[in-house]
Every structure is written in structure tokens, then in C-alpha cells.
Image (tube, helix red, strand yellow):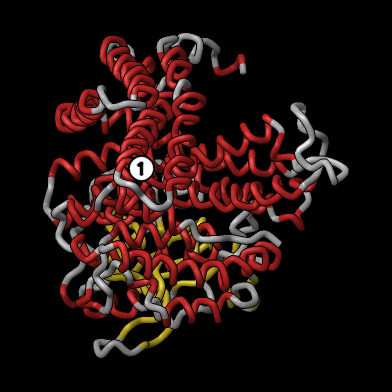
């Protein structure tokens, strides 16, 4: 059976050596002392390794069941959910006013990676609840927050987001679900939603659905969409549960992966709902949830890559096949372990350098969210808005790629279900699709985010890269990080210039290159992070750090990324500069 060990040491390096969280001045970060974060991460690591990871193959094999209108989760999920609740994990970074612990989002993100790596399908139940909590916390009335949030923070009640309908996914302006006003201020919600993760289950007393719907007479398209709170069981004014609402499960989907999560078709047949936020401003409220969810999905891509890498590494050290071409390394055995072979090393180094770089990139993004919210920093908000589609799209694309490479290490055994690698590939695959398919993330990046605030935020990013390279130009050994980073950044700038010169005349020239641009940008972001980690590792070694091997390993891994991964920016730029002509050359009938 596959195993999982929480990478707490690497997380501590990112939090304290790289980001230096206690020195940022962000309110609440002074509490994030190394001893405290270590204790939290170690405790989270125990429950993920001992409780959630063993349930991962159970959830994959059993899946959820739907009989007589009741959705049941796999064996052991309910008991594990109680353990998670008892530990207060769902409310780690939630508002203390509603029972949360008030920790920064960055710590919740680090813990979230551990939970998702150990059992992605299970963790989605609390993850979606956190997103629904955030939307109500940001846009709800005081009465709504008092009624729903305490039970959602504890996960006694869980939450969902209901956007997609059978005929509309990305284009939500086409939705048909309607909300008819009632005399008491409530609305009657009628329609069908599909692909609703954690739509129903047996682990919570109530489920609070956030549902997008149209109020009759509102504007056409996306501007006429509103957001509603629609509980599975109605909630009385005193917080007790009332009668069953007119919302039901049509079926649970049979999926490629995340079998342990109940992905439901939800039918609303005149269900009672309550407006969240302002009429016809539903997307504004929903995006509070979706932006958080997109970072969470990027984290899922990293998490699956991490657990796949851990198991591939263990297999490569144990599996005996062939001899090292430079001489036997296991002379007393029939063959050497496959980790001696250069191509296996290449494969594992791809995985290791991605996972460590992606983790640092993700936690930097989480810190920007804290900075924007806790310090009311508009520049941090602008930068994380720019980076969100990159985090979601790049980390999930590469995350899947890394799970496939981990599977490859196993050879034929990787294709056999009992070894567990297939599940990581299948579970990672959905991350490229939900919360906005990655092609849409690329379009959002190029079509909206680059030009946001007059291009201020992308220019600030370029200045950040330029400033780092300049400040570290004379430091011994840093050129092998700064020189590739400068080249990659120039490729990114050249791509932006191409879009400006050609995209105005023909938007297809920009949109045809959007996916390559997202990956180009992702590589530069991870390249910047690796260069910063190299500087942090060098500083630690210079100060006489006790664990020199850890920091030397960090430097060697970073060198690999800069030499073997970052040069991909040149390929992406070359593709971008070919424009749209070859992409759009065929007529529809010629396909």
C-alpha cells in the first residue's frame, strides 16, 4: 500500500528561511514562530499519515453510494471526519467570532496540502465548506453569518458551490435556474445543477448550498445572476434544524477519479433560498469562493505530485533492475536499484524540483492573500489576482505530468491498481478541469489579468525579478540561478510585447498563445522562487546551519530546475510568436 509522510521540514524552510514570515509585518504573522508552526504541521502530519492516507485507496475502491435518496461515503470516512472536526482543523484559519482559530491563511494552506496529498477526495468535503464559509463571511448579513457560520466552521454543517448546469459550464450567462421572490423575503429556487462536489453525504447534519440563479426580470447574461443560500434542511431562527428543503440528489456521477467524494446532480424543486449579497451581483459573491478554490486546486495539483513522488522514490530505491553503467552499486545482489540509472534520476529530479518549487510558489501566493486582507494592501491583492490563474493552471498541468512520471518509475507495476499510482494520476486529472478549466485560466490571464490596472501588476512582477537579479549579481554561486532567471524573464516580456503588437489588430494572435503564456509565466514564477530559495539556502549555510546536507540538497535541486526545466520558456515563446495563423488555418469542415 502507498504511504505518505508530511514534508514538514520543507514547509518550515519555506515559511522561515524563504518567506521569513515573522518579519513580514503582516498582522498575525508574529504568532508564526518556528516552534509553533512546527507543532501545527507535525500534528497535521500525524492525522494525514495515520488516518487519512490509509483511507485513500478505500475511498478510491469503494466510492460513494446512492440508494433510496441517501448518499453514503466510503467505509471509515465518517469516523475520520469526526477526528478532523475534533482537532479543529476545518476552522484553523477561520474567524474566531464564529468558532475559528484565526490563524493566517498561509498556515491553512500548508495544512491543506498535507490533507489533500493524503486523501484529496476526503479533504474536498471540508475544503468546499471553507469556500462557502468565506463567501458568506464576506457577503452575508450579520444574521446570516450568525445562523450559518459557527456550524460551518466546525463542519457540523458542510457547504457546496452550485454553478454548472447541463447546458452551461464556463458560460454561466446561459444558466436557467430561477429564483422567484416570495413575500417573506425568501426565494423559490428551481433548476438543476450538475458536477456538485460534496453535494450530499452522511457526514454532516446539514449541507449549506450556495446556488447561482436568476431572479425574473433581471438583466440578461451573467449580469442577471444572483447567489443564494439554500440549506438541505431549513434552519430555524434559534439555529435548530427545521424541515427538509425541496432539494434532492438526482444521482451521483461515476468519475475517473476522486471516487471518495460524492459528485452530485442536484435538483431544486421550488427550494427555499435566501439572497447572499446583492441582487444580480452573484458572480461577485461567488468569486470570493472561486478565487480561494482556484488556489486550493493548484494546491491539489502539487499535493498529488508530492505523494506520487514520495512513493516513486521509495520504489526506485527498492526495485532491483540492471546494473549501473559505471559499475555495480549493489555487488552482493542480483542487480542494482533502479535509482542508479540516469533516466530514473532525471524523472525523479523533475518531480522533486517541481514539488519543492511549487510548494514555495503556492505559499508565497497564500502570503499575498494574507497581506492583501490583513494589511489592506492593494498591490498585494493585484499581484495575487494576476498570479491566481498561473497557480491554478500551471500547478495542475505540471502536477498531473509529475504523477504520470512517478507512475512511469514503476514500469508495468505503475499500471496495476494495487500499487496505487493509478489513483494519483486519476485524482490529479480533475484539477485541470474544475474551478475553471485551464484553457479558461489562460484566457483570463491574457485577456484580463495582464492589462488589469493598466498592466501595473505584471510590471511590478518584472521589477521584482529584475531587482532580485541585480541585488544578487555579485554573490558567489548565484549566477547559475540569476542568469537563467533573467533569460526566462526576457522571454516572458517578449511574449507580452508580441501580444501588444499583434493582439490589438487580431485578438486571436494573443489568445492562440495564451496557454503557452500561462506555462511560460509559471516557469518564471517557479524560477524566481527557486532563485530565492537558493539565496536562503546559501545564507543558512553561511551562518553555520546544523543541517548542511538539507541546504546543499536544496541548492542541487534548484540548479536542476534552472538547468533542465526553466529553459522551456524559450519553447513557449517560440510558439507564441507564430501567432494564430496556423492555429486557425482550417475551416470547421476541414477538421
The C terminus sits in image quarter: top right
Tell me the element at label 1. Answer: helix
Residue at the far front in the pictured view: 544
Q: Is residue 336 above or below residue 243?
A: above
Q: Is residue 149 above or below residue 264?
A: below
In the rendered image, which residue does mark 1 sit on?
541
- Residue 196 percent across, percent down from the top left: 48, 60
Nearer to us in this view, 282 or 257: 257
Q: Could you tell me if residue 510 is visible in this image? A: no
Q: Is residue 292 above or below residue 325?
A: below
- Residue 381 percent across, percent down from the top left: 19, 45
Res 180 → quadrant: bottom left
Looking at the image, which residue is at 68% across and 30% down? Answer: 343
Nearer to us in this view, 247 or 40: 40
Position of residue 547 in the picture relative to residue 275 (left or right) = right
Q: How many numbered marks appear?
A: 1
Nearer to us in this view, 145 or 542: 542
Position of residue 493 in the picture relative to residue 193 (left or right) = left
Q: Could you tell me if residue 156 is visible in this image? A: yes
The N terminus sits in image quarter: bottom right
Res 378 → quadrant: top left
Nearer to us in this view, 506 or 266: 506
Looking at the image, which residue is at 41% across and 20% down? Answer: 513
**How crowded is the residue under tag 1: few (<14 C-alpha within 10 Å), some, or many (20+)?**
some
- Residue 362 percent across, percent down from the top left: 37, 47
- Residue 109 percent across, percent down from the top left: 36, 57
Looking at the image, which residue is at 61% across and 39% down? Answer: 348
Looking at the image, which residue is at 32% across and 12% down? Answer: 498
Residue at the far right in the pictured view: 334
Amino acid at each position: 500500500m502507498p504511504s505518505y509522510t508530511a514534508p514538514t521540514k520543507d514547509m518550515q524552510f519555506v515559511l522561515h528561511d524563504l518567506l521569513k514570515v515573522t518579519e513580514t509585518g503582516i498582522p498575525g504573522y508574529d504568532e508564526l514562530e518556528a516552534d509553533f508552526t512546527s507543532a501545527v504541521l507535525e500534528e497535521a502530519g500525524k492525522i494525514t499519515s495515520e488516518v487519512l492516507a490509509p483511507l485513500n485507496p478505500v475511498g478510491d475502491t469503494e466510492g460513494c453510494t446512492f440508494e433510496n435518496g441517501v448518499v453514503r461515503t466510503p467505509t471509515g470516512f465518517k469516523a475520520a471526519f469526526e477526528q478532523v472536526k475534533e482537532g479543529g482543523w476545518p476552522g484553523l484559519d477561520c474567524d474566531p467570532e464564529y468558532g475559528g482559530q484565526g490563524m493566517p491563511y498561509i498556515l491553512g494552506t500548508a495544512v491543506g496540502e498535507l490533507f489533500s496529498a493524503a486523501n484529496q477526495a476526503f479533504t474536498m468535503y471540508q475544503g468546499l465548506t471553507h469556500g462557502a464559509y468565506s463567501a458568506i463571511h464576506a457577503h452575508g448579513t450579520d444574521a446570516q453569518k450568525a445562523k450559518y457560520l459557527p456550524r460551518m466552521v466546525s463542519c457540523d454543517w458542510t457547504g457546496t458551490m452550485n454553478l454548472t448546469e447541463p447546458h452551461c459550464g464556463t458560460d454561466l450567462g446561459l444558466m436557467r435556474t430561477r429564483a422567484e421572490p416570495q413575500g417573506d423575503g425568501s426565494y423559490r429556487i428551481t433548476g438543476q445543477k450538475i458536477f456538485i462536489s460534496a453535494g450530499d453525504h452522511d457526514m454532516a447534519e446539514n449541507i449549506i448550498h450556495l446556488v447561482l440563479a436568476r431572479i425574473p426580470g433581471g438583466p440578461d447574461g451573467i449580469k442577471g445572476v444572483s447567489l443564494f443560500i439554500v440549506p438541505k434542511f431549513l434552519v430555524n431562527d434559534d439555529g435548530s434544524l427545521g424541515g427538509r428543503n425541496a432539494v434532492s440528489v438526482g444521482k451521483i456521477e461515476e468519475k475517473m477519479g476522486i471516487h471518495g467524494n460524492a459528485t452530485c446532480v442536484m435538483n431544486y424543486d421550488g427550494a427555499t433560498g435566501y439572497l447572499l449579497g446583492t441582487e444580480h451581483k452573484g458572480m461577485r459573491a461567488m468569486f470570493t469562493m472561486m478565487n480561494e478554490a482556484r488556489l486550493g486546486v493548484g494546491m491539489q495539483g502539487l499535493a498529488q505530485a508530492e505523494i506520487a513522488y514520495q512513493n516513486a522514490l521509495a520504489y526506485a530505491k527498492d526495485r532491483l533492475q540492471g546494473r549501473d553503467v559505471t559499475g555495480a552499486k549493489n555487488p552482493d545482489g542480483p542487480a542494482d536499484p533502479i535509482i542508479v540509472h540516469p533516466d530514473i534520476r532525471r524523472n525523479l529530479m523533475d518531480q522533486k524540483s517541481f514539488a519543492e518549487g511549487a510548494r514555495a510558489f503556492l505559499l508565497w501566493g497564500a502570503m499575498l492573500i494574507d497581506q492583501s486582507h490583513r494589511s489592506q494592501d492593494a498591490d498585494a491583492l493585484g499581484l495575487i489576482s494576476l498570479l491566481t490563474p498561473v497557480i491554478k493552471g500551471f500547478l495542475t498541468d505540471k502536477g498531473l505530468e509529475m504523477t504520470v512520471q512517478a507512475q512511469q518509475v514503476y514500469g508495468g507495476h505503475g499500471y496495476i491498481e494495487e500499487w496505487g499510482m493509478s489513483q494519483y494520476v486519476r485524482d490529479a486529472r480533475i484539477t485541470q478541469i474544475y474551478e475553471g478549466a485551464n484553457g479558461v485560466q489562460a484566457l483570463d490571464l491574457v485577456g484580463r489579468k495582464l492589462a488589469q490596472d493598466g498592466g501595473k501588476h505584471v510590471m511590478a512582477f518584472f521589477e521584482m525579478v529584475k531587482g532580485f537579479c541585480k541585488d544578487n549579481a555579485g554573490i558567489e554561486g548565484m549566477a547559475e540561478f540569476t542568469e537563467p532567471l533573467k533569460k526566462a524573464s526576457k522571454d516572458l516580456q517578449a511574449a507580452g510585447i508580441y501580444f501588444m503588437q499583434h493582439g490589438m489588430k487580431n485578438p486571436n494572435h494573443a489568445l492562440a498563445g495564451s496557454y503557452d503564456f500561462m506555462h511560460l509565466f509559471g516557469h518564471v514564477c517557479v524560477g524566481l522562487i527557486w532563485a530565492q530559495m537558493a539565496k536562503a539556502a546559501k545564507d543558512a549555510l553561511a551562518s553555520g546551519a546544523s543541517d548542511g546536507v538539507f541546504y546543499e540538497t536544496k541548492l542541487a535541486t534548484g540548479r536542476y530546475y534552472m538547468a533542465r526545466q526553466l529553459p522551456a520558456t524559450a519553447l513557449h515563446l517560440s510558439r507564441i510568436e507564430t501567432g494564430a495563423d496556423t492555429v486557425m488555418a482550417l475551416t470547421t469542415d476541414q477538421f
